[in-house]
Image (cartoon, grey):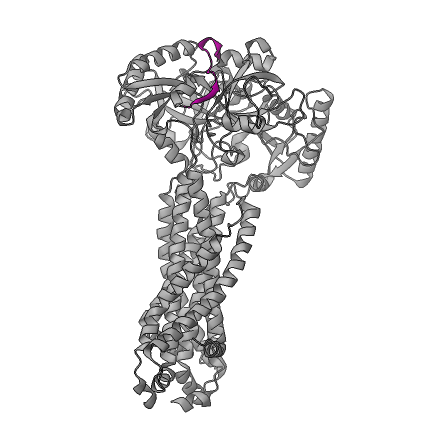
């Protein structure tokens, strides 16, 4: 197909041609970035928590007024919950991965008197934490029952710098171990927290995600040998078979109410619900972006249909002359298809430059990574296809113009 | 021409409607494109407008949020490190008792169990604000019944409480409940006041609790909350050996309280800044602060700006919608150009019959204005639909997304303005046609 006559025709419709190119370019730029944003959100929503997600339930309780016997109450709660049929394990923990609540963090140092922290990690603690959550130990050991300290004694000791009542051991997850001691064994190493409190690594667990602030490294977590109570913000976590979850949750709530009616259930549900709620904004954003992409492509396609129809109408006579001079229907069809292909190509080239520009400013303001190069060919093919589909109708109508039109005056 | 203005306008309007009716599909396409673009933009702009609004119009310029830096030197970068976003108990009390501002209040968030006296109501949790008395006059909080407590009650850790009108409705059916006793966390507190309708958004005075949504249900003196060991709810940031725990102790190296001051003139603000530097120096010489004085004194709107309270997603959505509007407009310009050029013959006849270029231009602009108005109405409907969808979202600002008068006017201005702008280029190029050339082809 000779493109020179097409170009010379387009030169006579400069403004319209440029408008179409501009529209395709803008659509291309916005769609590329929107698809990239959706991809980012989906990737974020796919982060593994590292725990047995489908087997866990959470119950958050609060007491009315002060509870001096909260630790004794916690033990009888845990014992009662373990008795419920279907319950495999029960824990009382300070926070859960990807839950967005109750952030507890620690700054880790590798040496005492180090001016800056080496790594910011999420700090988990609680009773029977790793076993109940289903986090595998990669090496070393879990905490021994006698090793756990009560949060109510740890807090004053921390403020008074009493080393005796502070933890001496810690379990780090694989991501922390790999980051702090690459290529070396983490077991037996020492880390420092707060005012140089030394902690010896006794175990390395599989990766465990943070509750929130994923941009700080989604998998950096450690576990302290500390117990807490519901009065100190802890929540009960129950492990059970996936199909038993609703039944066990009902029994657990009833059992806790029987033990002490004078407390309020602040929240309960499966871990799946918690994780679902944590990513709700990402899900909503991905939905909105998808809607915008569909709307943009529709508007652009309709614009191409409108302009192409107009051109076909305007050139009816010229088409008739060409047909009379021997051009086949296929020639006419290909003419409009090639014309659209040329316009789309100009638009795509301009659009890719624009897409990178938009991506650069997003990187600057919203901490997004660079647009991967794969978006260029995929975006180009998508817009070429869109253009060809949109122009097909008008082009077929053009091809149907009979040669006899040339002999009539309009 | 001037005297004939209105008649010409109605003539043009008539022509425009006729022309639009002649090509219904193309017209519908253009109106739809404008409506979609306007609808999307107005939805996101309304959300942005609501979220970046002034929570206390008229007062916000004289309210300031002092920041100081009491941390040790771990991670200190001179000139770069920002001071803390809240204050510790010791610094908060020192600054409060210094009384160097026109008014001041020290506060923090909390969560308390309410035990209703009625048999039918189970105990439930309410968010609470523990604050000194300055909170109410300084923020201009309206009262429906009763009054706020005063400095005397603060000093005596009095068992008094102020409740929101929503909680008053729930517990007392909206009646005057002042003087009654409210049981919370096993304690009895006397209700001294019931708030009127007060829902400042953003929730500026404590952005760690939540950024948007309902205000607290219960307000009680900070001193009383500490006496009763009521639970703290909100952000706490610790350094050194601080950390953990729901309610940091008073001596812990943790910041967990908000301190607001009212400074009526810029001169007072400058003096207060100097006082903050002086205070930091004093604490440094006492050995409490390890860093050189590092203070900020931002007013309310500057503070919201600094904390980037408008969610990044909302900003992103606004840019996205404006980009979409741009594509829709380019699309409309193209279609309008095609339409006007198609009518070259008709325009040529009018030119040949004596209509001036400017008359043709005006006629075509009226036509694009009509399109814009139709698109604006469509866009408004779509924006209402869009805002309804936003309100169904789970975000905490969702319930605030409503169209107000100013945004309504903006919608129509944007729609008509945008379509007139889109009509200028096509109308101009259609007017450039030489009348003779067009007549020849007839």
Residue B313 lies left or right of residue B374; in this view the side is right
Residue B119 shows in the view = yes
Q: Which segment is the magenta one? A: A135-149
Where residue B322 sits in the image (x, y, percent)?
47, 56
Nearer to me, B321 or B164:
B321
Percent across and percent down for residue B199 are: 45, 37
Asked if residue B104 lies left or right of residue A262, the reply is right
Q: Where residue B306 sits in the image (x, y, percent)?
A: 58, 40
Depth order, front residue of A178/A343:
A178
B127 part of magenta stretch:
no
The quarter in which the N terminus of chain A is drawn is bottom left
> Which residue corresponds to the image point at 51% horizontal and 50% vertical from the top-left?
A371
As for residue A140 lying within the magenta part, the answer is yes
Residue B315, x across and y down, in percent: 49, 48
Question: Between A194 and B376, which is closer to the camera in this rendering?
Answer: A194
B144, above or below B364, in the image: above
Q: Quadrant of the C terminus of chain A?
A: bottom left
The outermost residue toward the front is A183
């Amino acid at each position: 197909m000779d493109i020179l006559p097409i170009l010379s025709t387009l030169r006579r419709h400069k403004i319209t041609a440029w408008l179409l190119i501009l529209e395709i370019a803008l659509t291309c730029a916005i769609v590329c970035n929107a698809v990239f944003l959706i991809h980012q959100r989906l990737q974020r929503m796919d982060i593994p928590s590292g725990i047995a997600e489908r087997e866990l339930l959470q119950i958050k309780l609060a007491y009315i007024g002060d509870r001096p016997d909260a630790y004794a109450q916690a033990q009888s709660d845990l014992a009662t919950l373990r008795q419920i049929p279907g319950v495999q394990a029960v824990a009382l923990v300070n926070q859960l991965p990807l839950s967005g609540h109750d952030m507890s963090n620690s700054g880790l140092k590798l040496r005492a008197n180090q001016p800056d922290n080496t790594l910011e990690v999420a700090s988990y603690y609680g009773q029977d934490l790793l076993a109940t959550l289903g986090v595998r130990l990669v090496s070393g050991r879990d905490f021994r029952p006698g090793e756990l300290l009560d949060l109510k004694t740890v807090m004053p000791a921390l403020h008074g710098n009493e080393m005796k009542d502070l933890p001496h051991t810690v379990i780090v997850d694989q991501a922390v171990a790999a980051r702090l001691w690459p290529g070396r064994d983490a077991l037996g190493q020492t880390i420092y927290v707060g005012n140089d409190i030394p902690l010896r690594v006794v175990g390395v667990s599989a990766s465990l995600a943070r509750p929130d602030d994923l941009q700080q490294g989604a998998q950096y977590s450690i576990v302290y040998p500390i117990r807490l109570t519901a009065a100190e913000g802890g929540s009960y976590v129950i492990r059970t078979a996936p199909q038993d979850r609703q039944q066990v949750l009902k029994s657990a709530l009833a059992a806790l109410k029987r033990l002490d009616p004078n407390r309020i259930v602040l929240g309960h549900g499966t871990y799946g619900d918690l994780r679902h709620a944590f990513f709700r904004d990402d899900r909503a954003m991905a939905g909105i972006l998808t809607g915008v992409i569909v709307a943009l492509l529709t508007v652009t396609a309709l614009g191409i249909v409108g302009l192409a129809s107009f051109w076909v109408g305007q050139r009816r006579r010229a088409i008739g002359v060409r047909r009379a001079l021997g051009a086949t229907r296929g020639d006419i069809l290909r003419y409009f298809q090639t014309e659209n292909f040329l316009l789309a190509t100009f638009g795509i080239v301009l659009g890719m430059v624009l897409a990178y520009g938009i991506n650069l400013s997003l990187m600057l303001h919203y901490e997004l990574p660079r647009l991967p190069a794969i978006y260029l060919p995929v975006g180009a093919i998508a817009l070429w296809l869109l253009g060809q589909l949109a122009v097909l109708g008008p082009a077929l109508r053009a091809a149907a113009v009979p040669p006899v039109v040339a002999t009539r005056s309009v | 021409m001037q005297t004939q203005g209105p008649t010409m306008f109605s003539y043009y309007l008539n022509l425009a409607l006729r022309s639009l009716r002649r090509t219904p599909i193309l017209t519908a396409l253009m109106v739809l494109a404008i409506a979609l673009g306007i609808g999307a933009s107005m939805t996101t702009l309304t959300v942005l407008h609501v979220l970046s609004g002034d929570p206390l119009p008229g007062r916000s310029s004289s309210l300031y949020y002092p920041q100081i830096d009491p941390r040790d030197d771990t991670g200190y970068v001179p000139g770069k490190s920002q001071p803390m976003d809240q204050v510790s108990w010791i610094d908060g009390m020192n600054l409060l008792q210094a009384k160097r501002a026109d008014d001041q209040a020290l506060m923090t968030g909390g969560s308390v169990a309410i035990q209703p006296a009625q048999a039918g109501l189970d105990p439930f949790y309410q968010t609470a604000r523990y604050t000194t008395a300055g909170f109410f006059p300084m923020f201009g909080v309206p009262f429906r019944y009763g009054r706020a407590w005063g400095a005397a009650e603060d000093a005596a850790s009095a068992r008094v409480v102020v409740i929101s009108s929503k909680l008053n409705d729930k517990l007392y059916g909206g009646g005057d409940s002042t003087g009654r006793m409210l049981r919370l966390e096993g304690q009895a507190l006397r209700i001294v006041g019931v708030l009127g309708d007060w829902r400042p958004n953003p929730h500026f005075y404590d952005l760690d609790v939540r950024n948007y949504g309902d205000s607290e249900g219960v307000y009680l003196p900070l001193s009383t909350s500490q006496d009763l060991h009521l639970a703290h709810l909100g952000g706490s940031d610790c350094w050194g050996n601080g950390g953990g725990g729901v309610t940091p102790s008073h001596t812990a190296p943790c910041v967990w309280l908000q301190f607001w001051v009212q400074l009526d003139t810029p001169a007072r603000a400058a003096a207060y800044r100097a006082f903050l530097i002086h205070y930091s120096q004093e604490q440094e010489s006492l050995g409490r602060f390890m860093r050189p004085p590092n203070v900020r004194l931002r007013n309310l709107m500057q503070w919201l700006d600094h904390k980037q309270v408008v969610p990044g997603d909302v900003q992103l959505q606004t840019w996205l919608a404006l980009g979409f509007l741009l594509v829709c407009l380019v699309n409309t310009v193209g279609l309008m150009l095609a339409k006007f050029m198609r009518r070259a013959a008709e325009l040529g006849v009018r030119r040949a019959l004596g209509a001036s270029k400017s008359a043709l231009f005006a006629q075509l602009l009226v036509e694009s204005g009509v399109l814009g108005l139709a698109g604006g109405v469509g866009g408004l409907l779509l924006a209402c639909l869009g805002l309804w969808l936003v309100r169904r979202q789970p975000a905490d600002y969702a319930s605030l997304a409503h169209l107000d008068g100013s945004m309504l006017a903006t919608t129509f201005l944007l729609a008509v303005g945008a379509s007139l702008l889109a009509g200028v280029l096509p109308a101009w190029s259609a007017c450039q046609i030489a009348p003779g050339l067009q007549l020849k082809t007839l």
